[in-house]
């Protein structure tokens, strides 16, 4: 079994020409260099240097030339591996994050920006899927609007309140009674994930909106409301209200729907990389900031600025 230290010493002697100069370069004693070369020769079963004696430089034997050529490759690979490990520990590498549309549009841009600012060489991969029952698989982190099944650890990072979205003037300022949505034309998201729960609440309350269009596009819902197709009930994160949104108003519902819960999951019993650990911390941080912002939003007609 070749020892990398012996190969480094071989390279130093071959480059410097003498055991003494190689010892100075490596910070060893000359006897230590001689011992390492002797150990190497024992490992490969023959002399790696011809030693003419006196002040003359040593010469590589044919066997020494073969060992040096391949040894330099091994030393270079070991150095590259050591460098990669150090960069990995410092936070470089790859992180895979599962997401869905609202998180992609609102939370993850800040997470990715901060992560790349700290670790410019990081390889960040995002995987977006709208599913009733997501699975974390080989992902490092997974956002979902509900608890995630399987062997995961998870935390609820955000409560996302529902609001009524309508053209300005459709409803008076202030809360909209849930019963006021009965028979009203409505633009809605597909009845999967938390949307299915919302529609069960309508049914249990005896409210039956007239759903005239469904779309999974978060921007498509308010666009159709703005066009006059109907009203909508959306989680605030999906709406991502702008204070200068032309023509729209947002209202709380009365009684309020239970907020949509945004959960962040990661694999149980699996060691996360330093980069994934940092992405996890930043995701929690950004979600907390968004929660604080959402808590301070006044839900009333939006006025142009």
Image (cartoon, rainbow, N blue to C red):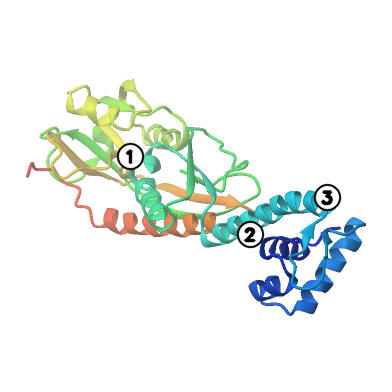
Whether pointer 1 and pointer 3 mark residues with C-beta atoms closer than 8 Å, the reply is no
Residue bearing mark 3: 62
In x, y percent, where is residue 288?
37, 59
Task: Identify which residue is drawn at 12% across, 35% down.
Answer: 246
Residue 1 in percent (x, y) is at: 86, 58
Which residue in the protein does label 2 denote? 82
Label 2 sits on a secondary structure element that is helix
Q: Nearer the viewer, residue 120 or 140?
A: 120
Quarter of the figure with residue 50: bottom right
Residue 97, image x, y percentages: 50, 44
The residue mark sitting in front, 3 or 2, is 3
Residue 27 picture location, percent across and down:
66, 77
Is 92 positioned to the left or the right of 72 in the image?
left
Q: Residues within 10 Å of mark 1 (few under 14, many from 20)?
A: many
Of the two numbered discs 1 and 3 on the same chain, state the one appearing first in sequence: 3
**Residue at image x 74%, y 65%?**
57
Residue found 67% across the figure and 52% down from its top: 77
* Circle 2 Cα neighbour tier, 10 Å, few/some/many (<14 / 14–19 / ≥20): few
| Left or right of residue 251: residue 103 | right
Name the residue that disc number 1 marks.
238
Q: CA distance from mark 1 to mark 3?
A: 71 Å
Asked whether residue 82 is in view, the answer is yes
Label 1 vs 2, first from the N-terminus: 2
User: Which comes before the other along the chain, label 3 or label 2?
Assistant: 3
Q: Secondary structure at mark 3?
A: helix
Label 3 vs label 2: CA separation?
30 Å
* Residue 219 badge: none
Separation of residues labelled 1 and 2 (CA atoms): 44 Å
Asked if residue 242 is positioned above or below residue 247 in the image, the reply reads below
Compared with residue 224, is residue 101 higher up or lower down, i.e. above or below? below
């Amino acid at each position: 079994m070749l020892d990398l230290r012996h190969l480094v010493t071989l390279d130093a002697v071959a480059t410097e020409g003498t055991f003494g100069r190689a010892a100075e370069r490596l910070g060893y004693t000359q006897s230590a260099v001689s011992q390492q070369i002797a150990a190497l020769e024992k490992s490969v079963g023959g002399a790696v240097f011809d030693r003419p004696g006196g002040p003359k430089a040593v010469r590589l034997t044919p066997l020494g030339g073969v060992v040096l050529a391949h040894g330099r490759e091994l030393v270079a690979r070991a150095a590259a591996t050591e460098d990669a490990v150090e960069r990995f520990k410092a936070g470089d590498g790859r992180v895979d994050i599962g997401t869905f549309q609202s998180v992609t549009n609102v939370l993850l841009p800040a997470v990715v920006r901060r992560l790349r600012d700290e670790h410019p060489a990081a390889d960040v991969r995002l995987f977006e899927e709208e599913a009733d029952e997501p699975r974390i698989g080989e992902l490092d982190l997974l956002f979902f609007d509900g608890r995630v099944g399987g062997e995961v650890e998870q935390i609820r990072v955000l409560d996302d309140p529902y609001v009524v979205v309508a053209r300005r003037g459709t409803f008076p300022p202030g809360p909209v009674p849930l019963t006021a949505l009965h028979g009203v034309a409505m633009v809605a998201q597909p009845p999967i994930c938390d949307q299915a729960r919302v529609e069960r609440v309508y049914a249990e309350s005896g409210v039956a909106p007239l759903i005239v269009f469904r779309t999974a596009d978060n921007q498509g819902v308010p666009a159709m409301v703005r066009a006059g197709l109907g009203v909508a009930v959306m989680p605030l994160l999906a709406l991502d209200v702008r204070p200068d949104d032309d023509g729209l108003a947002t209202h709380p519902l009365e009684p309020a729907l239970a907020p949509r819960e945004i959960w962040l999951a990661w694999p149980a019993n699996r060691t996360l990389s330093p980069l994934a650990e940092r992405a996890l911390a930043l995701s929690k941080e950004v979600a907390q900031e968004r929660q604080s912002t959402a808590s301070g939003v006044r839900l009333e007609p939006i006025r142009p600025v």
